[in-house]
Image (cartoon, rainbow, N blue to C red):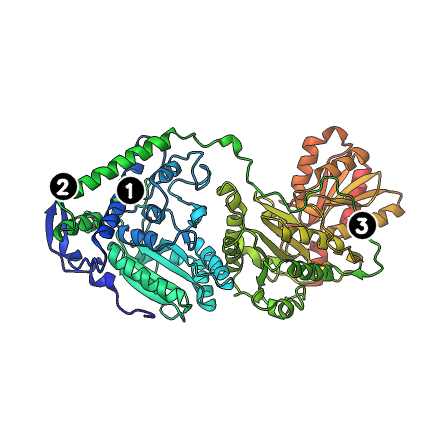
Amino acid sequence: MKNNESNNAQKKGSKNSNKTVQMEYLGKNIDVDLFSNFDFGKLDKDTIIKWYKTMHLGRKLDEKASLYLKMAKGWSFHAPFAGHDGIQLALGLIFRQKKDFLFTYYRDMLTALSAGITPVEIILNGLSKETDKTGNGRHMSNHFANVEIGIQNVSSCTGNHSLHAAGVARAAKKFKNDGIAYYSSGESACSEGYFWEAVNVATLEKLPVVFVIQNNYYGISVPLKDQTANQITSENYRGMKDLLIVNCDGRDPFDSFKALQEAQEYVLAGKGPAFVHADCDRIGSHSNSDRHELYRSKEELEEVRRRDPLMQFRYHILEKNILTPDELTALEEENKETIFAASDDAEAAPNADGSRFMEFILPEPYYKNDNFVEPAFNSSETISFLEGINRTLKEEFRANPKIFMWGQDLGKGGVFNAVKGMPEEFGKERVFNAPIAEDCIVGTANGFCRFDPELRVVIEGAEFADYFWPAMEQLIECSHDYWRSAGQFTPNITIRLASGGYIQGGLYHSQNLEAVFITQPGIRIVNPAFASDAVGLLRNCIRSEGTTIFIEPKFLYNFKPAHTPVPESDYIIPFGKGRIIRPGKDVTIVSYGNAVHISNMAATELEKAGINAEVIDLRSIKPWDKELVFDSVKKTGKVLVAHEDRVFGGFGGEIASTISDEMFKYLDAPVMRVGSKNTPVGFAKSYENAILLNSNDIIQNVNKLVNY
């Protein structure tokens, strides 16, 4: 039933319930009547026993993790799940291996165990062993994954995997697959803007995703009342169309499983996404570094301990004669032996090999040619920078039906008409508008790629590069997915960004972002200056595995000097291959993007004064062509790095530093840099002229170098 108004959590087990009958059981006080309706339903005896055995095994693993921590053997981060037992057991059980996609979070140890990750694999992760399936010890402890069966490698950025779940659900729907994406997290992550974006896009497209929220009323030390007005978090989403909301008691595995079954049935029927809100307790601290007694009263802690789901389950198994006390004790002893054996196996495994830290930063590109030679284009037809992008996109989409594209205003061909004609030719199933939510655009692309490693996604990360900032969180995620998972997953995404000034755009329409991007390992960055380079690099971006930022200097879209002859069919350029666009002997000017043309214009003027400048177009800035630059430095002995971005903190500083470090003996003068002023780019033309890099800036600095 859609927008289920019943709230089982409030009826039987919430903190507000006054119905309590306490009794002592195994030396502990429990509130047995809170679970007096503990409904085994139509489950057979063997299934009930299996469920209890899994829950008990999970608790023993949780206790073992704490013990390892105390012994300083591992698990430097541990978030206990006690009090979340019911929903975690049920979520693992409802998950279908190799069909569904499960995105757990750091407290989901029992979820992972119930879903199919073995005790040995869990301990391997906790001890950061080389054979840890999550990522060979690269990822934090208590982050469990097994990509082979569909349990995704999720980062520590709380809640950001909600967008990945929506993205893979989008792919499942497009390919008419009956897989479901399950997102699991705590209630406090619902305060993040990207969680709203995920639910919004899931309802907009009626995606097969189930959002499971485990509400224990605390975000570390911050109580839920300081997070949101509704203490039942699902109430915040009541108005969203086609969203099934089911509230359940997250302590109770049977109530939780029924809620998830209802969600599963609704989603598989194609009606839309579901939101399962599980009322839970956090019996322990948030994590090993948290002392919850500093902000929780003794009375509250005693109350949640009385509702301990494991004790409740155990009591009712005996009370309903499912097992005898001896049988139950024997089962529990068997679990203890399982833990002992798993610990022995895991401890004997090799520790993570830190010497392999440089592996899995980026996959090999599609086209890598160390002996690449610039071709001569014979065509008499020329194309603009913008036409080169448009043609290449269409050619790649025609050749590969597994390429998809989304972004803002794509339905009309994009803000600058770079994708003109594509929605009409390839249909809205492959080229379509996205909500105006940059984090959602990138995050769903990340998730989409998880459906099939052969998928390629091209996105307009923002209408203008300046608007990309909200997506930085997801870009960071993309930058370490491949490394974090030890090569098991990489988002195959090309992020197109219209960048730079000279169009009188002002704030949010004229800035450059590459200096920020460049600091992140795990992404490529290209910044072409000519139409043919845009063609060759874009083709390599799309065909390659990994995440690449394709920067498009929008001033060059129709700039005549950026026009080139039409490249031959299938033309492609390797990453990290620059070229000399103007040979010279007196000074080297290293540049990229808009600055290439400004440098070339400056070189023309310098030549009139008898100064012969060599101009290098890097084309790719990550990686960048050090060999080409170094060869030029050996010839000229003097270097100026020119880019449109601000000098202060700009990428030119990295180039200059590298030249100084590795080519010092060839230098006849200090390496100099020139770029835009260290201010925002103003709107009035007079501001733009004063702030942005211009040819006079380059000429003045070259003269300083020559006369040094």
Mark 3 highlights which residue? 600
What SS does tag 1 mark?
A: loop
Is residue 231 in sight in this rendering?
Answer: no
Question: Could you say where residue 481 lies in the image, as x and y percent from the top left?
Answer: 51, 46
Residue 461 to residue 615: above or below: below
Viewer-nearest of labels 2 and 3?
Answer: 2
Seen from the viewer's position, the closer of residues 608 and 239 is 239
Instruction: Indicate left or right for 150 with 609 as reference.
Output: left
Sooner in the amino-acid sequence: mark 3 or mark 1: 1
Name the mark on residue 255: none
Mark 2 highlights which residue? 326
What type is the residue that disc 3 sits on? Asn
Mark 1 highlights which residue? 291
Q: Residue at x 43, y 55 (%)?
A: 99
Question: Could you say where residue 475 lies in the image, as x and y percent from the top left?
Answer: 54, 51
Instruction: Indicate left or right for 200 with 44 as reference.
Output: right
User: Marks 3/1: CA distance?
Assistant: 63 Å
Question: Could you say where residue 664 lies in the image, as x and y percent from the top left?
Answer: 72, 30
Sooner in the amino-acid sequence: mark 2 or mark 1: 1
Instruction: Indicate left or right for 467 with 590 as reference.
Output: left
Quarter assignment of residue 180: bottom left
What type is the residue that disc 2 sits on? Asp
What type is the residue that disc 1 sits on? Arg
Instruction: Indicate left or right for 483 with 5 as reference.
Output: right
The quadrant of the rendering that contains the C terminus is top right
User: Marks 2/3: CA distance?
Assistant: 87 Å
Seen from the viewer's position, the closer of residues 113 and 631 is 113
Residue 600 to residue 259: above or below: above
Sooner in the amino-acid sequence: mark 2 or mark 3: 2
